[in-house]
Amino acid sequence: NAGVIQTPRHKVTGKGQEATLWCEPISGHSAVFWYRQTIVQGLEFLTYFRNQAPIDDSGMPKERFSAQMPNQSHSTLKIQSTQPQDSAVYLCASGRDRGDTQYFGPGTRLLVL
Amino acid sequence: SQLAEENSWALSVHEGESVTVNCSYKTSITALQWYRQKSGKGPAQLILIRSNEREKRNGRLRATLDTSSQSSSLSITATRCEDTAVYFCATDEHYNQGKLIFGQGTKLSIKP
């Protein structure tokens, strides 16, 4: 069991460019979560999927951020027109179901210059 | 607004000593979880304690939950250098299970 896999581990983009972050959840887990971590804001919930369906995107900035889960083996978080304030570690987690233990990946460190 | 928060930003103890991290939360919950995050890694769950439980143990770790005061504690006995990490409490919301609300974290340093 490789755990939750996130790629890339580090990404540097220029302001205004698009960034796509990739998450492969643990096989058999039905819930997939995205969080963002910064020094100032800490760990913030962004969105989650259950059985590939979007359930709660209340933490997603309304513009520029979108997440998808086209199949049970991967989810993507896309940020359009990246801004310096988007710089953060983006963490993906998966769990057998909502309310259960969430297993986190190592994160993708995004730096927007 | 934060729904969960630890009560100390940082703690430091010597190896072998015991330490307790406290957490308070503000909503009705179904469970509270304690996570540990080491440098460069994602958080890893230590203990999940449900709202109908008062205490849970996992090896050298002991978590308590007091729903009346909306508080929890995580105690670590016989600390080791590898316990150095940031410790978070995280709660779900009773009517919105799934997403976790994390506290700001307590940085624990274990000195040799």
Image: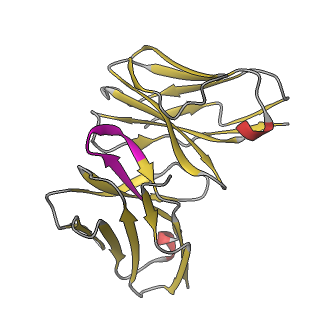
Quarter of the image with the C terminus of chain A is top right
Counting from the top left corner in percent of width and height, residue A33 is at 44, 33
Quarter of the image with the N terminus of chain A is top left
Residue A26 sits above or below residue B67 on the image: above
Compared across the picture, whether A109 is left or right of A42 comes to right
Compared across the picture, whether A55 is left or right of A24 comes to left
Which residue appears farthest toward the top when viewing the image?
A70
- In the image, B59 versus A66, the foreground residue is A66
Report the number of discs.
0
Counting from the top left corner in percent of width and height, residue B25 is at 37, 61
Residue A21 sits above or below residue B103 on the image: above
Is there any visible trace of residue A1 in the rendered image?
A: no
Which residue sits at x=34%, y=76%? B75
Which region of the structure is painted magenta?
B89-100
Which residue sits at x=55%, y=43%? A106
Compared across the picture, whether B23 is left or right of B104 comes to left
Counting from the top left corner in percent of width and height, residue A75 is at 49, 21
Which residue sits at x=21%, y=68%? B68
Residue B45 in magenta stretch: no
Residue B94 in magenta stretch: yes
- In the image, B63 versus A56, the foreground residue is A56
Which residue sits at x=45%, y=77%? B80
What secondary structure do most residues of the magenta stretch adopt? strand
Residue B71 sits above or below residue A35 on the image: below
Which residue appears farthest toward the left when viewing the image?
B52
Is there any visible trace of residue B54 in the rendered image?
A: yes
| Res B107 → quadrant | bottom right
Which colour scheme appears in the figure? secondary structure
Residue A103 sits above or below residue B53 on the image: above
Counting from the top left corner in percent of width and height, residue B39 is at 60, 58
